[in-house]
Image (tube, grey):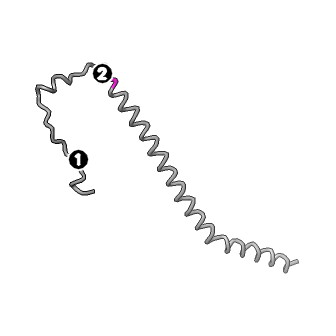
Amino acid sequence: MQDDDIPIITNVVRRDRRADLTLTAEQRQSITNEVTAMTNTMLDELLNDTAEQVRAVLYEQLQLRLADSLPAIIESVIQNHLDQRKGQ
């Protein structure tokens, strides 16, 4: 992202216009509740997406470790069975 991509607010809000923006306690509470609800929804989505990404990475790493270890496991099991047959 370059500086040119960042939106810049060019309209100046004058103090006399801000007087029209006074909110009641109920309106402020309503806005707070809506922002909180939307934030919680976004947080849930981000956490779910992140959990899926982490699960995918861990699954891939486990598969690679298993693929690396499986030949030695199989060889060990076969060797144990062969040694047991020789001992009989």
Q: Is residue 29 magenta?
A: yes
Left or right of residue 76: residue 3:
left
Residue farthest right in this picture: 88
In the structure shown, which secondary structural element does the residue marked by tag 2 occupy?
Answer: helix
Residue 27's label in the rendered image is 2
Name the foreground residue: 72 vs 9.
9
Question: Within 10 angstroms of label 1, few (less than 14), some, or many (20 or more) residues?
Answer: few
Q: Is residue 3 above or below residue 48?
A: below
User: Which picture quadrant has residue 8?
Assistant: top left
Q: Is residue 19 above or below residue 8?
A: above
Badge 1 or badge 2: first in the primary sequence = 1
Q: Residue at x 85, y 77 (%)?
A: 85
Q: Residue at x 54, y 59 (%)?
A: 58
The span from disc 1 to disc 2 (Cα, nearest Å) is 28 Å
Give the overall secondary structure of the magenta segment.
Answer: helix
Q: Residue at x 23, y 47 (%)?
A: 7
Quadrant for the N terminus, please: bottom left
Q: Nearer the viewer, mark 1 or mark 2?
A: 1
Q: Position of residue 34 (x, y in %)?
A: 37, 29
Q: Position of residue 40 (x, y in %)?
A: 42, 36
| Tag 2: amino acid | Gln
Q: Residue at x 18, y 22 (%)?
A: 20
Q: Position of residue 39 (x, y in %)?
A: 38, 37
Q: How many marks?
A: 2
Q: Is residue 28 above or below residue 43?
A: above
Q: Is residue 7 magenta?
A: no
Residue denoted by label 1: 7
What residue range appears in magenta? 25-30
Name the foreground residue: 11 vs 35.
11
Quadrant for the C terminus, please: bottom right
